[in-house]
Image (spheres, helix red, strand yellow):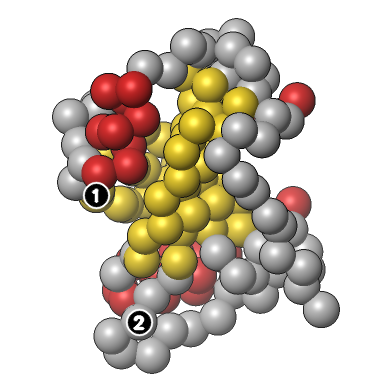
Amino acid sequence: MLNAEHFKIGDKRPEWVYPGSLIRSDYNSLTWMLTIGFPDITEQEIEELQSGSVSFAFTVINNTIFLLFKFGRFEWMDTPYEPRLNPESTYVSFPEGTGAALTLLIVDSANGELKGMRTLGMGNALSNNLHELCR
């Protein structure tokens, strides 16, 4: 049985502390997780990540999956994803009109504090192609 992880604004975690920009991806059979953090993240950056337009894509380079994201006016960002690190995860196929969920965690990487969150749906074709690749 899968246990959903709980997050709340103000949470601080050591894995979110990083001296520069932090971009990480993960998947737990319930949702894709994307953690984006900047040291001393500004309210404007948080707002752009929470409310800006979003584009998703993925590519494979040297047998490594890279998830690609663009939020609002930010430049494209990428993060590797390795399905073999999550052997318990199930990469399902999605019926037409549905897709994978993505939870965005917005953190201040200077102190590891969760500053914002956003939940999005990835499109059907993108979700199915990504999950097929992960299987």
- Residue to which mark 2 is pinned: 98
Label 1: state its secondary structure.
Answer: strand
Q: Taking 73 as reference, is 114 left or right?
A: right
Q: Taking 17 as reference, is 116 left or right?
A: left
Which residue is found at the position 41% from the left and 35% from the top? 78
Say if mark 2 contacts mark 1, CB within 8 Å. Answer: no
Return the x and y of residue 69 as percentages of the image width and height. Answer: 33, 42
Indicate the quadrant where residue 112 lies: top right
Q: Which mark is residue 55?
A: 1
Query: Which image quadrant: the N terminus?
Result: bottom right
Which residue is found at the position 61% from the left and 45% from the top? 8
Q: Which mark is residue 33?
A: none
- Is residue 24 visible in the rendered image? The answer is no
The amino acid type, in three-letter code, at marker 2 is Thr
Q: How many marks?
A: 2
Return the x and y of residue 65 as percentages of the image width and height. Answer: 50, 48
